[in-house]
Image (spheres, helix red, strand yellow):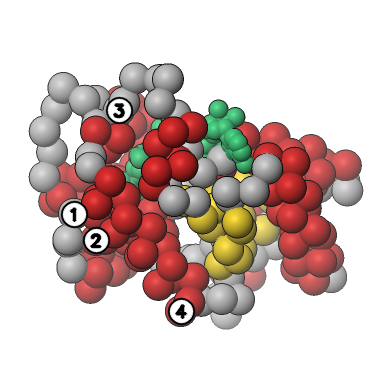
Amino acid sequence: MTVQESTIRRGMFITLEGIEGAGKSSAIPILAAFCEAQGYAVERTREPGGGPLGEALRGIFLNPELTLDAEAELLLLYAGRRDHWLNRIQPALAEGKIVLCDRYEDSTYAYQSGGRGFPQGRIAELARWAGITQAPDLTFWFDVSPELGAARIRARKADRLEQEQMAFFTRVRSVFAQRQAAEPGRILRIDAAASIDQVHATLLADLAPRLKQHFS
Ligand code: Z5A
């Protein structure tokens, strides 16, 4: 391990994943409060976005007036992710913080490969090229059916991705499931159809021993 890698690994990188309406954003303040109560410093962030460039690109990425193909989506995502990693995530980890990130690279595989059909090998190639090589330490996958997720967000105006059909979100969900099966140590499945209190209690019960183990 290089000196730089050992420094970066002082903090803990936690991501939250799942389809829209799964409950990720609602869980971030709960996880943050729990970590802070244990004395950890927390950096809350999100993708698309997170860094200054990524936040500017997010507006383009989600704009329902624009049509982007899978290549354009990927190039925007990785331009933003590189900026996010270099200017926000990596410095926070180097300071020993817990980084709580609403979506990250698992979303790219789920949406751009599962949803759009882009080959996974080419996503991996682009990630390497962009310098995105460190996986999260822990990922919570909020698993919910596309129907329930959509019902939870029905009242708000749909962004560009949310205009997709149910079949798209079914494919997205199945790639999250494949990734969880391939990396069960990193990706924990949360039954996100449960009540919000139950989901939050499960998250904290899963997080507590992993925090202890990571920082011991
Ligand atoms: N995208 C991509 O294509 N490729 C990538 O690499 C990345 C992203 C990184 C970002 O959207 C879009 O970018 C996303 C994928 C794509 N598009 N889609 N679809 P975003 O950041 O704007 O939105 P989101 O991440 O999908 O957030 P969301 O729709 O708000 O979902 P959420 O954060 O998981 O849900 P929530 O806001 O916590 O909850 C939604 C509502 O449900 C809210 O009223 C809650 O009170 C309620 N809720 C939450 N949990 C429960 C439970 N357990 N029971 C009942 N009600 C609940």
Q: In this view, does 180 lie to the left or right of 162?
A: right
> Dot 2: what SS?
helix
Residue type, numbered disc 3: Asp
Mark identifier at residue 159:
3
Can you identify the residue that label 4 sits on?
182
Instruction: Say which residue appears at 40% left-offset and 36% top-offset.
Output: 150
The disc, 1 or 4, on the residue closer to the chain's N-terminal end is 1
Mark 1 to mark 4 CA distance (whole Å):
21 Å
Foreground residue among 156 and 161: 156
**Does 215 sit above or below residue 41?**
below
212 relative to 51, above or below: below
Which comes sooner in the sequence, label 3 or label 1? 1
Q: Give the CA distance from mark 4 to mark 3.
A: 30 Å
Q: Nearer the viewer, residue 43 or 168?
A: 168
Task: Give SS at disc 4.
Answer: helix
Residue position marked by numbered label 2 in the rendering? 113
